[in-house]
Amino acid sequence: MPKSEKSKISKGVNQKLKKEIERVFNLQLQNSAIVSQTTSAERIAKLKLLNQKLFETREQLCTALFEDFQKNPAETEVTELYPVVSEIRHAIKNLKKWMKPVKVKTPISLLGSSARIQYQPKGVVAIISPWNYPVNLTLGPLVSAIAAGNCVIIKPSEMTPSSSKYMRELITGIFPENEVAIFEGDAAVSTEILSKPFHHIFYTGNPAVGKIVMTAAARNLTSVTLELGGKSPVVIDESADIGEAAKKISWAKFVNCGQTCIAPDYILVHDSLRHDFLALLKKGIAEKYGNTDEEIKKSKNLSRIINSRHFLRLTNLLNSAIKAGANIEYGGVTDAKSNYISPTILTEVPLNSSIMQEEIFGPLFPVITFSDLPEAIDYINSGEKPLAAYFYGKNKENIRRFIQKTSSGGVCINDSMIHFSNLNLPFGGINNSGLGNGHGIFGFKAFSHERAILRQHLKKPFLQMLYPPYTPFARKLIDLTVKYF
Ligand code: NAD
């Protein structure tokens, strides 16, 4: 997301809302002493209730997403409901194990003591979420926060009002406000929430606001998880099965109309495959959305751009790319009235055009060619570290090189985006694409303090021999300890 996309903070929240946030925050502070002591069984009961209510309100969930994005209900089930209920199931299955203290080894110098790591809830945490997968990216972290034994204040995005309303009704129907509360509103509400001394802030959104969140957190020395974005590249190696690649990439790029943090942002294809790959990519789009411009526009499978501001941002990116010399290879149909942009493939895109400089976050797809892998790797490494990086190819040496020589939050080889669904993997970015991880045990840990606990069992442990006064004997022991233990 470009810096100009930074949401403007309106005048601030009114006094009533300010007091309300303060009141609920204080209630949660008091209650966190109780919530933090809950057992795995008690936390699992809460997660089961959340799961049950999600299934009971499945239809309302789909309606909300349709109102916000014109999103197909089947896509809502795959990309909004499934990630949350699978996160719940995974937490229910593993929570008892996650909560157990972890015994660690003792070095010889500390012989006679034992040590363990105990996971303690951080306390009262904030979850600030974006619009692109409004339910998935709000309730997913909520599952981890509840599993870890926290009280939670949620601030969903103002850009998806129907989804936010759905979540408010869901949350207030399950949890008392001193445990989980939700405040709807824009950046001003977010700013007010960020002024409170939370014990952790889990923010998902663009990197520019990520910096604002981290600055606000620093004032209270609050820890943060920042789930940000970036330009996630796809490399089509000379050794790739381009039919399979095109099928997978045309899904990953255009699901949610390209408004996905880990969507392939642009393609680097080996120049020997350019022609055939482009034909297959177009075929992949046609199979999913229709054969003609008209069919694609009428397709019930394609979501819309979230609002006119983002529509304008994307059409500006498209127009300036064309002005700079890019060629519309496919699509390029836009309709401001319905915030519609068709799946669009661009070729001959100048690398210094803005579409190659900022995260696209929409259905515009630049395809660039390269002649040898180091060239593609150098290009990727010349930009900010992305949230994901994708490689299609069978050549093992090239796969190894790609993994070893690039840096990104996550990597998928011969597929795109599905690493998000493996809850045994951490999900997060690096530097400009994020800080910290969510999902499974990594989400549980994000909302927990790893407390170091050492217990001394000896009255006179060895280390006492190293105390002053530093006699020749003590000096000898110190020397041996430094050298060998
Ligand atoms: P957004 O505009 O909805 O903003 C996210 C949240 O930040 C909202 O709740 C919003 O109210 C709040 N906010 C906005 N401006 C603020 C400010 N000045 N101060 C405090 N809070 C503020 O969503 P977005 O940022 O447009 O989301 C899209 C971006 O998020 C993309 O860059 C995408 O890659 C990234 N993203 C990352 C992930 C991930 O898991 N890493 C997931 C989804 C989206």
Image: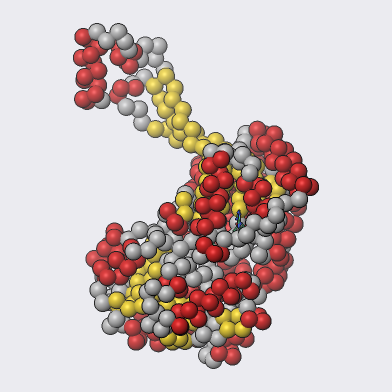
Q: In which quarter of the image is ligand 1?
A: bottom right
| Image x and y of residue 340, in percent | 60, 80
Quarter of the image with the C terminus in it: top left
**Residue with the most extreme right position:** 16
| Image x and y of residue 289, in percent | 55, 83
Q: In this view, does 445 lie above or below 299?
A: above
Question: In percent of the image, x 59 and y 71: which residue is there?
Answer: 310
Question: In percent of the image, x 32 and y 68: which residue is there?
Answer: 379
Question: In percent of the image, x 40 and y 25: which residue is there?
Answer: 114
Residue 249, picture quadrant: bottom left
Residue 152, picture quadrant: top right
| Image x and y of residue 8, in percent | 62, 59
Between 149 and 220, the one lying in front of the other is 220
Q: In this view, does 360 lie above or below 17?
A: below
Question: In percent of the image, x 53 and y 48: which residue is there?
Answer: 214
Give left or right: position of 97 versus 376. Answer: right
Is residue 177 among what the camera can see? no
Between 4 and 257, the one lying in front of the other is 4
